[in-house]
Amino acid sequence: MIYSVNGKIIHKTADSAVIDCGGIGYLCRTTLSTLSQIGRTGETAMLYTYLHVREDNIELFGFATEQELNCFKMLISVSGVGPKAGLAILSDTNPEKFALTVATGDYKVFTKTKGVGPKLAQRVVLELKDKITKEQLSGGVPAEDIFEAVSEGSNTSEAISALVVLGYSQTEAASAVAKLDASLAVEELIRQALKKMAANL
């Protein structure tokens, strides 16, 4: 498995970037968000990658952040969502909004993406929400700070759920959110919690 690629950007298209690593150019399919973050041809970039293997094709997908990579992996785990649809959805949103959409069940957000109808959008939300709930239940008894954060209001509860969608444990998410101002908007809570957790790495 290729975890990441780091090198000079030698070519960019509307949906891909070619990164030169030791004289080998790796073509990475990617999102509009990542393309806007990695800079221009000739500059150095690092992408977190996912290798997608099928009987008739092997493709490498690259993302500017681990959060976006996690969202992509979750999307393609949903029946009926292939890599192309996954990239399209993530090109129309960001990890924070994606996580919030799943956590709140607002499937209509995904229908704004070309090629994603109401049925597929509902399936994405239902399957991912169900998967996340099962993972939370299998994680044992939540820590006290989870109850404290959730009890402060629905914004903190939604922010914690959204962070779990991004791959953090419920305890990690709740610990970060519990230290923030509960009156903040959900997206701002998510953004600040991500910064706190990144600073603790």
Image (tube, rainbow, N blue to C red):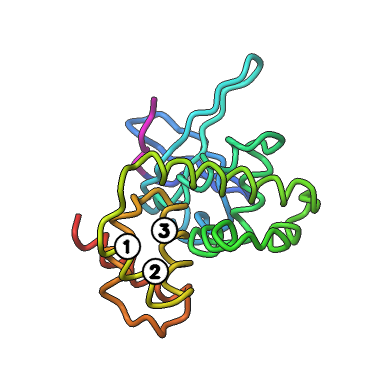
Q: Which residue is mark 2?
A: 150
**For the magenta stretch, what is the residue range?**
1-7
Observer able to see residue 62: yes
Q: Residue at x 49, y 47 (%)?
A: 133
Q: Which residue is mark 1?
A: 146
Residue contact between numbered discs 1 and 2, judged by CB atoms under 8 Å: yes
131 inside magenta stretch? no
In the rendered view, does 191 fall on the left or right side of 56? left
Residue contact between numbered discs 2 and 3, judged by CB atoms under 8 Å: no
**For mark 1, does the 10 Å Cα neighbourhood hold few (<14), some (14 to 19), or many (20 or more) residues?**
many
Closer to the camera in the image, 74 or 161: 161
- Image quadrant where one finds the N terminus: top left
Q: Residue at x 72, y 51 (%)?
A: 121
Name the amino acid type tagged 1.
Ile
Image quarter of residue 139? top left
Q: Residue at x 26, y 60 (%)?
A: 198
Extreme-bottom residue of the structure: 183
Cα distance between the residues tagged 3 and 1: 13 Å
Is tag 3's residue or tag 1's residue first in the polypeptide sequence?
1
Q: Which residue is mark 3?
A: 163
Is tag 2's residue or tag 3's residue first in the polypeptide sequence?
2
Where is residue 61? Give x, y as percent: 52, 38
Q: Which SS class for mark 1?
A: helix
In the rendered view, does 163 fall on the left or right side of 200? right
